[in-house]
Amino acid sequence: MTELLAKAKRLGFHGMAAHWEEYSNQPWLKELLELEDEERRARSLARRIRDAKIGHFKPLSEFDWEWPRRIDRELVEELFTFKFLQKAVNVVFMAPNGLGKTMLAQNLAYEALLAGYDAKFIKASKLLDQLAECDGAHARRRCLRKYSGVDLLVVDEVGYMRYGDNHADLLYEVISERYQNLSTVVTTNKPFKEWGDVFPNAACVVTLVDQLMHKAELVVIEGDSYRQKEAKERLEAREKQRKDRQASLAKANSANRTCNKLSVRGGAK
């Protein structure tokens, strides 16, 4: 009964808690508190999923593990136990375009939310633009706090664009704020030796990579683009449908001509 009283207080039923002796033996009490607790948890999860801004993504069950030439499936599946979050370990998914690194990162963020963690998902370009557009240090610190305190931050597509001189400094601020305290997931299509091209003339790139990878799991994926594979399969499927329709039409026309010939012969008799 003390557990139910604690739950009533946690849920904000202060009047009920103050007159607990009057309510504690009611047969509907336990069901009511559990129903309210479940509803609040559901609303909280829905809000956290909305705020995470993960976007549309395919579930992990649709990931084709056989397609990449190289991927450490055991490591990826281990990430979904979220032990890395408990140790403030970072994760870097490094792969060419179209091999599912963003899909894996999105699923990781989503499953973290279901497990009770807070998460945010953001494209690198959007994150850096938000920070760069802040008017003054105070505004930038306020913006930075949105990303520095969340349990899991996913920064997607580092390397897809070239950035201005100060953007590396801004990304470094994000990584540094979270360094050894909270986990950051980064997806990139560039090996670290090419990050100097992504952030030209930036002196902090080496330090940025050093802090990111000091405590990190690196998931390297190699192979041909899965998106191109899917596009090719869709094209082949449409071509097959077109040929099947043409064959069906030709067969129907042939049958009609045969029927017409038989009708003509029958009329001649």
Image (cartoon, helix red, strand yellow):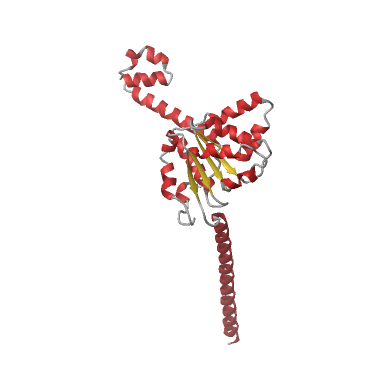
> How many circles with numbers are drawn on the protein?
0
Q: Quadrant of the C terminus?
A: bottom right
- Residue 263 locus on image (x, y percent): 58, 81
- In the image, 86: left or right of 238? left
Q: Is residue 28 visible?
A: no
Q: Residue at x 53, y 47 (%)?
A: 94
Q: Residue at x 45, y 27 (%)?
A: 40
Q: Quadrant of the N terminus?
A: top left
User: Which image quadrant for residue 78?
Assistant: top left
Residue farthest toward the top in the current orientation of the protein: 18
- Residue 172 locus on image (x, y percent): 59, 34
- Residue 257 locus on image (x, y percent): 60, 78
Near-viewer residue (69 or 245): 69
Q: Residue at x 40, y 40 (%)?
A: 81
- Residue 166 locus on image (x, y percent): 67, 35
Q: Is residue 214 visible?
A: yes
